[in-house]
Image (cartoon, coloured by chain):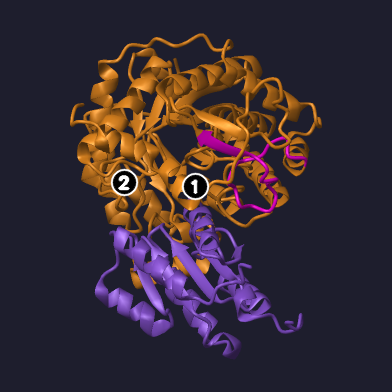
Chain colours: A purple, B orange
Amino acid sequence: MSNPLTPAPGDQPVLVAGGISDSHTWNLVYLQLLVEEHGHRVVNLGPCVPEDLLIGEALLHDPALIVVSSVNGHGYHDGMRTVTRLREHPALADVPVVIGGKLGIAGPCGDEESAALRAAGYDEVFEESADGIAAFRRMLDALPQRALV
Amino acid sequence: MTGAGFGAFVRRAHHAGRLVVQPRMGMSSPQRMRAGLLATRDADATTVGTLTLDSYTRVGDLESAQLAVLEGVDLNGYPLVSHETATTRRVLDGIHGPQFPVQVRHGSAAPQHIFRALTAVGLDASEGGPVSYCLPYGRVPLRDSVAHWTESCEHFATLRRTGAEPHLETFGGCVLGQLCPPGLLVAVSVLEALFFRRHGIRSISVSYAQQTNRRQDSEAVAALRSLCTRFLSDTEWHVVVYAYMGLFPETEHGARRLLAQAAELAVQSGSERLIVKTVAESRRIPSVAENVSALEHAAAVAARTVRDPLEGTGTETYAEAYALVDAVLNLDDDLGTALLRAFSEGRLDVPYCLHPDNAGLSRSYIAEDGRLCWSDVGKMPLSGVVDARPAHTVTSSELLASLSYVRRSFDDHNARS
Protein backbone atom coordinates (compact mmCIF):
# COMPACT_ATOMS: atom_id res chain seq x y z
CA MET A 1 0.00 0.00 0.00
CA SER A 2 1.34 3.38 -0.86
CA ASN A 3 1.26 6.14 1.67
CA PRO A 4 -1.05 8.93 0.42
CA LEU A 5 1.30 11.54 1.88
CA THR A 6 4.20 10.38 -0.28
CA PRO A 7 2.88 9.86 -3.78
CA ALA A 8 4.53 7.18 -5.88
CA PRO A 9 6.86 8.57 -8.57
CA GLY A 10 4.40 7.43 -11.22
CA ASP A 11 1.74 9.77 -9.85
CA GLN A 12 3.81 12.83 -10.59
CA PRO A 13 2.21 14.75 -13.44
CA VAL A 14 3.81 16.25 -16.51
CA LEU A 15 3.53 20.06 -16.61
CA VAL A 16 2.89 21.50 -20.08
CA ALA A 17 3.41 25.24 -20.54
CA GLY A 18 3.51 27.78 -23.36
CA GLY A 19 6.39 30.27 -23.56
CA ILE A 20 6.21 33.49 -21.55
CA SER A 21 5.01 35.59 -24.49
CA ASP A 22 3.55 32.84 -26.68
CA SER A 23 -0.22 32.85 -27.24
CA HIS A 24 -0.41 29.69 -29.34
CA THR A 25 -2.42 26.83 -27.85
CA TRP A 26 -2.85 24.05 -30.44
CA ASN A 27 0.68 22.89 -29.67
CA LEU A 28 -0.32 22.64 -26.00
CA VAL A 29 -3.57 20.75 -26.69
CA TYR A 30 -1.65 18.30 -28.88
CA LEU A 31 1.09 17.82 -26.30
CA GLN A 32 -1.46 17.13 -23.58
CA LEU A 33 -3.09 14.36 -25.61
CA LEU A 34 0.28 12.91 -26.63
CA VAL A 35 1.65 12.88 -23.09
CA GLU A 36 -1.59 11.38 -21.72
CA GLU A 37 -1.42 8.61 -24.31
CA HIS A 38 2.01 7.75 -22.94
CA GLY A 39 0.42 7.10 -19.57
CA HIS A 40 1.05 10.36 -17.73
CA ARG A 41 -1.28 12.77 -16.05
CA VAL A 42 -0.98 16.30 -17.48
CA VAL A 43 -1.33 19.67 -15.82
CA ASN A 44 -1.72 22.03 -18.77
CA LEU A 45 -0.84 25.60 -17.78
CA GLY A 46 -1.92 27.01 -21.15
CA PRO A 47 -0.29 29.83 -23.14
CA CYS A 48 1.81 32.79 -21.96
CA VAL A 49 3.15 31.23 -18.76
CA PRO A 50 5.27 33.67 -16.73
CA GLU A 51 8.30 32.33 -14.85
CA ASP A 52 6.73 32.80 -11.43
CA LEU A 53 3.60 30.85 -12.36
CA LEU A 54 5.62 27.97 -13.76
CA ILE A 55 7.84 27.91 -10.67
CA GLY A 56 4.82 28.01 -8.34
CA GLU A 57 3.05 25.20 -10.19
CA ALA A 58 6.23 23.13 -10.31
CA LEU A 59 6.72 23.47 -6.56
CA LEU A 60 3.05 22.56 -6.03
CA HIS A 61 2.86 19.52 -8.32
CA ASP A 62 6.39 18.09 -8.07
CA PRO A 63 6.20 17.05 -11.74
CA ALA A 64 7.98 14.12 -13.36
CA LEU A 65 8.72 16.43 -16.31
CA ILE A 66 8.17 20.03 -17.41
CA VAL A 67 7.55 20.61 -21.11
CA VAL A 68 7.90 24.17 -22.40
CA SER A 69 6.51 24.64 -25.91
CA SER A 70 6.94 27.76 -28.03
CA VAL A 71 6.16 28.54 -31.66
CA ASN A 72 6.08 32.36 -31.82
CA GLY A 73 9.78 32.95 -32.44
CA HIS A 74 10.56 34.11 -28.91
CA GLY A 75 11.16 30.55 -27.69
CA TYR A 76 14.90 30.93 -27.37
CA HIS A 77 14.83 34.15 -25.35
CA ASP A 78 11.73 33.30 -23.31
CA GLY A 79 13.02 29.79 -22.76
CA MET A 80 16.34 31.06 -21.43
CA ARG A 81 14.59 33.33 -18.95
CA THR A 82 12.27 30.61 -17.77
CA VAL A 83 14.84 27.92 -17.16
CA THR A 84 17.37 30.28 -15.59
CA ARG A 85 14.82 31.41 -13.01
CA LEU A 86 13.50 27.91 -12.48
CA ARG A 87 16.92 26.38 -11.82
CA GLU A 88 17.60 29.03 -9.15
CA HIS A 89 15.14 27.19 -6.92
CA PRO A 90 16.94 24.45 -4.99
CA ALA A 91 13.77 22.30 -5.05
CA LEU A 92 13.71 22.48 -8.86
CA ALA A 93 17.39 21.96 -9.53
CA ASP A 94 16.88 18.39 -10.71
CA VAL A 95 13.39 18.26 -12.20
CA PRO A 96 13.61 17.27 -15.87
CA VAL A 97 12.76 20.28 -18.09
CA VAL A 98 12.60 20.20 -21.88
CA ILE A 99 11.74 22.79 -24.51
CA GLY A 100 10.54 22.41 -28.07
CA GLY A 101 8.80 24.07 -31.02
CA LYS A 102 9.79 26.80 -33.43
CA LEU A 103 12.34 28.46 -31.21
CA GLY A 104 13.77 31.26 -33.37
CA ILE A 105 12.35 34.16 -35.38
CA ALA A 106 14.18 32.96 -38.48
CA GLY A 107 13.02 29.35 -38.14
CA PRO A 108 14.79 26.64 -36.14
CA CYS A 109 17.46 27.88 -33.78
CA GLY A 110 20.96 26.62 -34.52
CA ASP A 111 23.27 24.21 -32.70
CA GLU A 112 24.80 27.08 -30.78
CA GLU A 113 21.42 28.19 -29.39
CA SER A 114 20.44 24.61 -28.61
CA ALA A 115 23.68 24.18 -26.69
CA ALA A 116 23.08 27.44 -24.84
CA LEU A 117 19.57 26.31 -23.87
CA ARG A 118 21.01 23.02 -22.56
CA ALA A 119 23.73 24.85 -20.68
CA ALA A 120 21.10 27.09 -19.08
CA GLY A 121 19.27 24.10 -17.67
CA TYR A 122 17.16 22.24 -20.24
CA ASP A 123 17.68 18.50 -20.35
CA GLU A 124 16.58 18.32 -23.99
CA VAL A 125 15.83 20.75 -26.84
CA PHE A 126 13.44 19.53 -29.54
CA GLU A 127 13.13 21.33 -32.86
CA GLU A 128 9.83 21.08 -34.70
CA SER A 129 10.38 18.14 -37.06
CA ALA A 130 9.48 14.48 -37.39
CA ASP A 131 12.80 13.64 -35.71
CA GLY A 132 12.04 16.04 -32.88
CA ILE A 133 8.65 14.44 -32.19
CA ALA A 134 10.09 10.92 -32.38
CA ALA A 135 12.82 11.85 -29.90
CA PHE A 136 10.21 13.43 -27.62
CA ARG A 137 8.11 10.23 -27.72
CA ARG A 138 11.14 8.12 -26.83
CA MET A 139 11.78 10.37 -23.86
CA LEU A 140 8.16 10.00 -22.70
CA ASP A 141 8.46 6.24 -22.92
CA ALA A 142 11.55 6.38 -20.75
CA LEU A 143 9.84 8.33 -17.96
CA PRO A 144 8.52 6.41 -14.97
CA GLN A 145 4.95 5.46 -15.88
CA ARG A 146 1.88 6.08 -13.82
CA ALA A 147 0.46 2.77 -12.59
CA LEU A 148 -1.89 1.60 -15.35
CA VAL A 149 -3.45 -1.34 -13.49
CA MET B 1 -17.47 59.23 -50.73
CA THR B 2 -15.47 61.25 -48.25
CA GLY B 3 -13.52 60.53 -45.10
CA ALA B 4 -9.86 60.02 -44.51
CA GLY B 5 -9.92 57.00 -42.24
CA PHE B 6 -9.24 53.31 -42.68
CA GLY B 7 -12.91 52.39 -43.16
CA ALA B 8 -13.45 55.10 -45.75
CA PHE B 9 -10.41 53.97 -47.74
CA VAL B 10 -11.69 50.39 -47.85
CA ARG B 11 -15.19 51.57 -48.81
CA ARG B 12 -13.85 53.65 -51.70
CA ALA B 13 -11.79 50.72 -52.99
CA HIS B 14 -14.80 48.39 -52.78
CA HIS B 15 -16.96 50.84 -54.73
CA ALA B 16 -14.23 50.98 -57.35
CA GLY B 17 -14.36 47.19 -57.62
CA ARG B 18 -11.05 46.49 -55.90
CA LEU B 19 -10.30 44.12 -53.00
CA VAL B 20 -8.01 45.67 -50.39
CA VAL B 21 -5.21 43.29 -49.47
CA GLN B 22 -3.10 43.53 -46.34
CA PRO B 23 -0.12 41.67 -44.87
CA ARG B 24 0.60 40.79 -41.29
CA MET B 25 3.94 42.45 -40.84
CA GLY B 26 5.99 43.69 -37.93
CA MET B 27 9.72 44.12 -37.40
CA SER B 28 11.44 45.55 -34.35
CA SER B 29 13.81 47.82 -36.29
CA PRO B 30 12.26 51.18 -37.29
CA GLN B 31 14.22 51.22 -40.56
CA ARG B 32 13.04 47.76 -41.55
CA MET B 33 9.48 48.52 -40.44
CA ARG B 34 9.45 51.60 -42.67
CA ALA B 35 10.88 49.61 -45.56
CA GLY B 36 8.16 46.99 -45.06
CA LEU B 37 5.42 49.61 -45.12
CA LEU B 38 6.87 51.20 -48.26
CA ALA B 39 7.07 47.83 -50.00
CA THR B 40 3.44 47.11 -49.02
CA ARG B 41 2.31 50.52 -50.32
CA ASP B 42 4.22 50.09 -53.57
CA ALA B 43 3.04 46.53 -54.27
CA ASP B 44 1.00 46.03 -57.43
CA ALA B 45 -2.25 45.80 -55.46
CA THR B 46 -4.68 47.96 -53.49
CA THR B 47 -3.08 47.75 -50.07
CA VAL B 48 -3.27 49.04 -46.54
CA GLY B 49 -0.33 48.88 -44.17
CA THR B 50 0.18 46.88 -41.01
CA LEU B 51 2.19 47.45 -37.87
CA THR B 52 2.09 44.12 -36.06
CA LEU B 53 3.39 44.47 -32.52
CA ASP B 54 5.77 42.09 -30.79
CA SER B 55 4.65 39.53 -28.23
CA TYR B 56 6.24 41.30 -25.24
CA THR B 57 4.25 44.46 -25.93
CA ARG B 58 1.15 42.32 -26.41
CA VAL B 59 1.37 40.70 -23.00
CA GLY B 60 2.35 44.00 -21.33
CA ASP B 61 5.93 42.94 -20.58
CA LEU B 62 7.24 46.37 -21.52
CA GLU B 63 10.48 45.84 -19.62
CA SER B 64 11.47 43.03 -21.99
CA ALA B 65 10.39 45.03 -25.03
CA GLN B 66 12.38 48.05 -23.84
CA LEU B 67 15.42 45.92 -23.12
CA ALA B 68 15.26 44.42 -26.62
CA VAL B 69 15.10 47.92 -28.13
CA LEU B 70 18.11 49.06 -26.09
CA GLU B 71 20.13 45.96 -26.91
CA GLY B 72 19.04 45.77 -30.54
CA VAL B 73 17.64 42.24 -30.10
CA ASP B 74 15.20 41.24 -32.86
CA LEU B 75 11.60 40.79 -31.76
CA ASN B 76 8.71 39.18 -33.61
CA GLY B 77 7.02 42.54 -34.16
CA TYR B 78 7.28 46.31 -33.79
CA PRO B 79 7.51 47.44 -30.13
CA LEU B 80 5.25 50.46 -30.58
CA VAL B 81 5.13 51.38 -26.91
CA SER B 82 8.88 51.12 -26.38
CA HIS B 83 10.09 53.12 -29.37
CA GLU B 84 10.04 56.91 -28.94
CA THR B 85 6.95 58.59 -30.37
CA ALA B 86 9.21 60.60 -32.65
CA THR B 87 10.82 57.38 -33.93
CA THR B 88 7.46 55.90 -34.93
CA ARG B 89 6.38 59.19 -36.47
CA ARG B 90 9.49 58.99 -38.66
CA VAL B 91 8.60 55.40 -39.59
CA LEU B 92 5.18 56.58 -40.76
CA ASP B 93 6.18 59.98 -42.17
CA GLY B 94 4.98 60.43 -45.74
CA ILE B 95 3.58 56.88 -45.80
CA HIS B 96 0.53 56.73 -43.52
CA GLY B 97 -2.33 58.87 -44.82
CA PRO B 98 -5.66 58.89 -46.65
CA GLN B 99 -4.14 57.01 -49.59
CA PHE B 100 -2.41 54.42 -47.43
CA PRO B 101 -3.90 53.94 -43.97
CA VAL B 102 -1.95 51.82 -41.51
CA GLN B 103 -3.54 49.48 -38.97
CA VAL B 104 -1.97 48.39 -35.67
CA ARG B 105 -2.34 44.68 -34.94
CA HIS B 106 -1.47 43.39 -31.50
CA GLY B 107 -3.43 40.60 -29.75
CA SER B 108 -3.68 42.13 -26.28
CA ALA B 109 -6.38 41.53 -23.67
CA ALA B 110 -5.16 44.64 -21.83
CA PRO B 111 -4.50 47.04 -24.70
CA GLN B 112 -4.79 50.46 -23.04
CA HIS B 113 -1.06 51.17 -23.44
CA ILE B 114 -1.25 50.18 -27.09
CA PHE B 115 -4.21 52.45 -27.87
CA ARG B 116 -2.49 55.35 -26.10
CA ALA B 117 0.68 54.77 -28.10
CA LEU B 118 -1.03 54.40 -31.47
CA THR B 119 -3.15 57.52 -31.09
CA ALA B 120 -0.04 59.44 -29.93
CA VAL B 121 1.65 58.76 -33.26
CA GLY B 122 -1.40 59.76 -35.31
CA LEU B 123 -2.78 56.31 -36.14
CA ASP B 124 -6.50 55.56 -36.01
CA ALA B 125 -7.03 51.89 -36.90
CA SER B 126 -6.54 48.73 -34.87
CA GLU B 127 -8.19 45.39 -34.14
CA GLY B 128 -8.96 42.77 -31.51
CA GLY B 129 -11.86 42.33 -29.12
CA PRO B 130 -12.66 41.46 -25.52
CA VAL B 131 -13.30 37.79 -26.28
CA SER B 132 -11.05 36.98 -29.22
CA TYR B 133 -7.95 38.58 -27.72
CA CYS B 134 -8.51 36.97 -24.37
CA LEU B 135 -9.84 33.45 -24.46
CA PRO B 136 -7.59 31.36 -26.57
CA TYR B 137 -4.57 33.56 -26.19
CA GLY B 138 -3.44 34.16 -22.69
CA ARG B 139 -4.08 34.24 -19.02
CA VAL B 140 -6.01 37.47 -18.48
CA PRO B 141 -9.43 36.72 -16.89
CA LEU B 142 -12.31 37.41 -19.30
CA ARG B 143 -13.83 39.86 -16.78
CA ASP B 144 -10.63 41.93 -16.86
CA SER B 145 -10.43 41.76 -20.64
CA VAL B 146 -13.98 43.12 -20.97
CA ALA B 147 -13.09 46.00 -18.63
CA HIS B 148 -9.81 46.72 -20.48
CA TRP B 149 -11.52 46.67 -23.86
CA THR B 150 -14.35 48.90 -22.62
CA GLU B 151 -11.82 51.46 -21.44
CA SER B 152 -9.77 51.15 -24.64
CA CYS B 153 -12.76 51.55 -26.97
CA GLU B 154 -13.98 54.58 -25.08
CA HIS B 155 -10.53 56.18 -25.15
CA PHE B 156 -10.14 55.34 -28.84
CA ALA B 157 -13.58 56.78 -29.65
CA THR B 158 -12.51 60.19 -28.32
CA LEU B 159 -10.44 60.54 -31.50
CA ARG B 160 -13.74 61.36 -33.19
CA ARG B 161 -13.65 64.76 -31.43
CA THR B 162 -10.57 65.58 -33.50
CA GLY B 163 -12.43 64.85 -36.73
CA ALA B 164 -10.83 61.43 -37.21
CA GLU B 165 -12.90 58.26 -37.63
CA PRO B 166 -11.25 55.60 -35.46
CA HIS B 167 -11.60 52.12 -36.93
CA LEU B 168 -11.66 48.79 -35.10
CA GLU B 169 -11.72 45.29 -36.53
CA THR B 170 -13.06 42.30 -34.63
CA PHE B 171 -10.74 39.32 -34.34
CA GLY B 172 -13.72 37.18 -33.33
CA GLY B 173 -14.06 35.54 -36.73
CA CYS B 174 -10.58 34.08 -36.29
CA VAL B 175 -10.89 32.54 -32.84
CA LEU B 176 -8.57 29.52 -32.46
CA GLY B 177 -7.34 29.90 -36.04
CA GLN B 178 -8.72 26.51 -36.99
CA LEU B 179 -11.27 23.86 -35.96
CA CYS B 180 -13.81 26.35 -34.60
CA PRO B 181 -17.10 25.81 -36.47
CA PRO B 182 -18.10 28.88 -38.53
CA GLY B 183 -21.38 29.56 -36.71
CA LEU B 184 -19.47 30.40 -33.53
CA LEU B 185 -16.86 32.45 -35.43
CA VAL B 186 -19.57 34.55 -37.04
CA ALA B 187 -21.39 35.00 -33.74
CA VAL B 188 -18.30 36.15 -31.84
CA SER B 189 -17.36 38.53 -34.66
CA VAL B 190 -20.83 40.12 -34.62
CA LEU B 191 -20.91 40.33 -30.82
CA GLU B 192 -17.52 42.05 -30.72
CA ALA B 193 -18.65 44.50 -33.40
CA LEU B 194 -21.71 45.31 -31.27
CA PHE B 195 -19.43 45.71 -28.25
CA PHE B 196 -17.28 48.24 -30.17
CA ARG B 197 -20.40 50.03 -31.39
CA ARG B 198 -21.84 50.34 -27.89
CA HIS B 199 -18.57 51.84 -26.66
CA GLY B 200 -18.55 54.59 -29.23
CA ILE B 201 -16.79 53.20 -32.31
CA ARG B 202 -18.59 54.03 -35.58
CA SER B 203 -16.28 52.47 -38.16
CA ILE B 204 -15.91 48.72 -37.79
CA SER B 205 -14.76 45.70 -39.72
CA VAL B 206 -15.82 42.16 -38.94
CA SER B 207 -13.41 39.31 -39.54
CA TYR B 208 -13.87 35.78 -40.80
CA ALA B 209 -11.02 33.30 -41.26
CA GLN B 210 -11.07 30.81 -44.13
CA GLN B 211 -11.68 27.30 -42.79
CA THR B 212 -11.87 23.85 -44.36
CA ASN B 213 -14.74 23.91 -46.88
CA ARG B 214 -15.36 26.55 -49.58
CA ARG B 215 -19.12 26.32 -49.58
CA GLN B 216 -19.31 26.53 -45.81
CA ASP B 217 -17.00 29.56 -45.82
CA SER B 218 -19.23 31.30 -48.37
CA GLU B 219 -22.26 30.57 -46.22
CA ALA B 220 -20.45 31.94 -43.18
CA VAL B 221 -19.49 35.24 -44.82
CA ALA B 222 -23.02 35.62 -46.19
CA ALA B 223 -24.40 34.99 -42.69
CA LEU B 224 -21.95 37.53 -41.25
CA ARG B 225 -23.07 40.17 -43.75
CA SER B 226 -26.75 39.48 -43.05
CA LEU B 227 -26.24 39.78 -39.30
CA CYS B 228 -24.27 43.03 -39.69
CA THR B 229 -26.98 44.47 -41.90
CA ARG B 230 -29.45 43.61 -39.18
CA PHE B 231 -27.49 44.68 -36.10
CA LEU B 232 -25.13 47.44 -37.35
CA SER B 233 -27.48 49.43 -39.53
CA ASP B 234 -26.23 52.78 -38.18
CA THR B 235 -22.54 51.94 -38.47
CA GLU B 236 -19.98 51.95 -41.26
CA TRP B 237 -18.81 48.34 -41.53
CA HIS B 238 -16.99 45.99 -43.87
CA VAL B 239 -15.92 42.36 -43.87
CA VAL B 240 -12.29 41.26 -43.74
CA VAL B 241 -11.47 37.70 -44.76
CA TYR B 242 -8.34 36.04 -43.39
CA ALA B 243 -6.45 33.52 -45.46
CA TYR B 244 -6.31 30.23 -43.56
CA MET B 245 -4.75 30.68 -40.13
CA GLY B 246 -4.01 27.10 -39.19
CA LEU B 247 -1.15 24.89 -40.31
CA PHE B 248 -0.30 26.29 -43.73
CA PRO B 249 0.76 24.16 -46.72
CA GLU B 250 4.48 23.54 -46.91
CA THR B 251 4.74 23.50 -50.71
CA GLU B 252 4.77 26.69 -52.73
CA HIS B 253 1.95 25.51 -55.02
CA GLY B 254 -0.15 24.48 -52.02
CA ALA B 255 0.36 27.79 -50.24
CA ARG B 256 -0.41 29.83 -53.35
CA ARG B 257 -3.54 27.85 -54.14
CA LEU B 258 -4.86 28.19 -50.59
CA LEU B 259 -4.25 31.95 -50.71
CA ALA B 260 -5.95 32.11 -54.11
CA GLN B 261 -9.02 30.39 -52.66
CA ALA B 262 -9.10 32.93 -49.86
CA ALA B 263 -9.02 35.76 -52.40
CA GLU B 264 -11.84 34.10 -54.36
CA LEU B 265 -13.86 33.69 -51.17
CA ALA B 266 -13.35 37.36 -50.33
CA VAL B 267 -14.45 38.67 -53.72
CA GLN B 268 -17.28 36.21 -54.37
CA SER B 269 -18.79 36.86 -50.94
CA GLY B 270 -18.70 40.62 -51.50
CA SER B 271 -16.06 41.17 -48.81
CA GLU B 272 -13.96 44.29 -48.91
CA ARG B 273 -10.56 43.29 -47.50
CA LEU B 274 -8.26 40.26 -47.26
CA ILE B 275 -5.41 39.46 -44.87
CA VAL B 276 -2.89 37.37 -46.78
CA LYS B 277 -0.55 34.57 -45.83
CA THR B 278 2.69 33.67 -47.55
CA VAL B 279 4.53 30.62 -48.81
CA ALA B 280 6.93 30.95 -45.87
CA GLU B 281 4.11 30.70 -43.32
CA SER B 282 4.63 27.06 -42.41
CA ARG B 283 8.27 27.64 -41.51
CA ARG B 284 8.84 31.10 -40.04
CA ILE B 285 7.85 34.76 -39.99
CA PRO B 286 7.76 35.81 -43.67
CA SER B 287 10.10 38.33 -45.29
CA VAL B 288 8.90 41.59 -46.84
CA ALA B 289 9.45 40.20 -50.34
CA GLU B 290 7.37 37.12 -49.54
CA ASN B 291 4.61 39.35 -48.22
CA VAL B 292 4.66 41.51 -51.36
CA SER B 293 4.50 38.41 -53.52
CA ALA B 294 1.47 37.17 -51.55
CA LEU B 295 -0.26 40.57 -51.82
CA GLU B 296 0.24 40.67 -55.58
CA HIS B 297 -0.86 37.06 -56.06
CA ALA B 298 -4.04 37.67 -54.04
CA ALA B 299 -4.76 40.92 -55.92
CA ALA B 300 -4.33 39.21 -59.29
CA VAL B 301 -6.72 36.40 -58.34
CA ALA B 302 -9.19 38.94 -56.93
CA ALA B 303 -9.11 40.97 -60.15
CA ARG B 304 -10.31 37.99 -62.18
CA THR B 305 -12.98 36.89 -59.68
CA VAL B 306 -16.60 38.04 -59.84
CA ARG B 307 -18.76 39.10 -56.91
CA ASP B 308 -21.45 36.50 -56.47
CA PRO B 309 -22.62 36.43 -52.85
CA LEU B 310 -24.93 33.75 -51.51
CA GLU B 311 -28.23 34.60 -49.92
CA GLY B 312 -27.35 35.04 -46.27
CA THR B 313 -30.09 33.78 -44.03
CA GLY B 314 -31.20 30.37 -45.29
CA THR B 315 -28.27 28.27 -44.08
CA GLU B 316 -27.46 26.26 -40.96
CA THR B 317 -24.45 28.52 -40.40
CA TYR B 318 -26.76 31.55 -40.23
CA ALA B 319 -29.24 29.78 -37.95
CA GLU B 320 -26.41 28.77 -35.62
CA ALA B 321 -24.79 32.22 -35.54
CA TYR B 322 -28.14 33.95 -35.05
CA ALA B 323 -29.12 31.61 -32.21
CA LEU B 324 -25.85 32.36 -30.40
CA VAL B 325 -25.99 36.14 -30.92
CA ASP B 326 -29.64 36.28 -29.91
CA ALA B 327 -29.03 34.18 -26.78
CA VAL B 328 -26.19 36.43 -25.64
CA LEU B 329 -28.03 39.70 -26.33
CA ASN B 330 -30.93 38.44 -24.22
CA LEU B 331 -28.75 37.72 -21.20
CA ASP B 332 -28.20 41.33 -20.14
CA ASP B 333 -28.64 44.87 -21.45
CA ASP B 334 -24.94 45.45 -20.90
CA LEU B 335 -23.10 43.49 -23.58
CA GLY B 336 -19.95 43.04 -21.48
CA THR B 337 -22.00 41.50 -18.68
CA ALA B 338 -23.90 39.40 -21.22
CA LEU B 339 -20.64 38.03 -22.67
CA LEU B 340 -19.36 37.15 -19.20
CA ARG B 341 -22.59 35.34 -18.35
CA ALA B 342 -22.60 33.58 -21.72
CA PHE B 343 -19.15 32.11 -21.13
CA SER B 344 -19.69 31.27 -17.48
CA GLU B 345 -22.91 29.43 -18.37
CA GLY B 346 -21.38 27.75 -21.41
CA ARG B 347 -23.76 29.45 -23.86
CA LEU B 348 -20.66 30.42 -25.77
CA ASP B 349 -18.02 27.69 -25.59
CA VAL B 350 -14.88 27.64 -27.71
CA PRO B 351 -13.78 24.08 -28.50
CA TYR B 352 -10.31 22.99 -27.31
CA CYS B 353 -9.78 26.37 -25.61
CA LEU B 354 -7.69 26.01 -22.44
CA HIS B 355 -8.71 29.30 -20.78
CA PRO B 356 -10.28 28.78 -17.32
CA ASP B 357 -13.19 31.12 -18.18
CA ASN B 358 -14.24 28.91 -21.10
CA ALA B 359 -16.58 26.02 -20.25
CA GLY B 360 -14.62 23.60 -22.42
CA LEU B 361 -17.54 21.25 -23.05
CA SER B 362 -17.78 21.73 -26.82
CA ARG B 363 -15.87 19.74 -29.44
CA SER B 364 -15.60 19.95 -33.21
CA TYR B 365 -14.50 17.71 -36.08
CA ILE B 366 -13.97 17.83 -39.83
CA ALA B 367 -16.63 15.86 -41.69
CA GLU B 368 -16.00 13.70 -44.76
CA ASP B 369 -16.86 16.57 -47.08
CA GLY B 370 -14.51 18.95 -45.27
CA ARG B 371 -17.15 20.90 -43.38
CA LEU B 372 -16.35 21.86 -39.81
CA CYS B 373 -19.03 20.43 -37.54
CA TRP B 374 -19.82 20.08 -33.87
CA SER B 375 -19.38 16.72 -32.22
CA ASP B 376 -20.56 18.27 -28.96
CA VAL B 377 -22.27 21.65 -28.52
CA GLY B 378 -21.92 21.55 -24.73
CA LYS B 379 -24.44 23.95 -23.21
CA MET B 380 -24.68 26.25 -26.21
CA PRO B 381 -28.29 26.96 -27.24
CA LEU B 382 -28.00 24.98 -30.46
CA SER B 383 -30.25 22.00 -29.91
CA GLY B 384 -32.64 21.81 -32.84
CA VAL B 385 -30.25 24.02 -34.85
CA VAL B 386 -27.23 21.75 -35.10
CA ASP B 387 -27.06 18.03 -35.66
CA ALA B 388 -24.09 17.15 -33.44
CA ARG B 389 -22.34 13.86 -33.96
CA PRO B 390 -21.87 11.98 -30.68
CA ALA B 391 -18.42 12.75 -29.38
CA HIS B 392 -15.67 10.24 -29.01
CA THR B 393 -12.33 10.90 -27.37
CA VAL B 394 -9.94 12.46 -29.83
CA THR B 395 -6.41 11.05 -29.88
CA SER B 396 -3.29 13.13 -30.45
CA SER B 397 -2.83 11.69 -33.94
CA GLU B 398 -6.47 12.41 -34.84
CA LEU B 399 -6.06 15.96 -33.59
CA LEU B 400 -2.88 16.36 -35.62
CA ALA B 401 -4.65 14.93 -38.69
CA SER B 402 -7.48 17.46 -38.26
CA LEU B 403 -5.07 20.31 -37.66
CA SER B 404 -3.13 19.42 -40.80
CA TYR B 405 -6.18 18.61 -42.96
CA VAL B 406 -5.85 21.78 -45.04
CA ARG B 407 -2.07 21.54 -45.30
CA ARG B 408 -2.34 17.95 -46.50
CA SER B 409 -5.16 18.65 -48.97
CA PHE B 410 -3.31 21.54 -50.60
CA ASP B 411 0.17 20.03 -50.55
CA ASP B 412 -0.99 16.72 -52.00
CA HIS B 413 -2.90 18.28 -54.83
CA ASN B 414 -1.09 18.34 -58.17
CA ALA B 415 0.66 21.64 -58.78
CA ARG B 416 -2.01 23.78 -60.35
CA SER B 417 -3.02 27.33 -59.58
- Name the residue furthest front: A149
Query: In screen coordinates, is B192 left or right of B84?
Result: right
For the magenta stretch, what is the residue range?
A: B345-365
Quadrant of the drawing holding the N terminus of chain B:
top left
> Which secondary structure is most common in the magenta stretch?
loop
Name the residue beneath numbered marker 1: B118
Query: Residue A91 in the image: x percent, y percent?
Result: 60, 88
Mark 2, other Cα within 10 Å: few <14 / some 14–19 / many ≥20: some
Query: Residue A129 in the image: x percent, y percent?
Result: 31, 59
- Name the residue furthest left: B415
Would residue A53 be seen by someone viewing this image from the given angle? yes
Q: Mark 2 lies on which chain?
A: B
Mark 1, other Cα within 10 Å: few <14 / some 14–19 / many ≥20: many
**What's the amino acid at mark 2?**
Glu
| Front residue of this view, candidates A25 and A105 | A25
Q: Are marks 2 and 1 in contact (CB under 8 Å)?
A: no
Q: Earlier in the sequence, mark 2 or mark 1?
A: 1
Query: Residue B10 in the image: x percent, y percent?
Result: 41, 24
**What's the amino acid at mark 1?**
Leu
Would residue B41 be seen by someone viewing this image from the given angle? no
Quadrant of the drawing holding the C terminus of chain B:
top left
Name the residue beneath numbered marker 2: B281
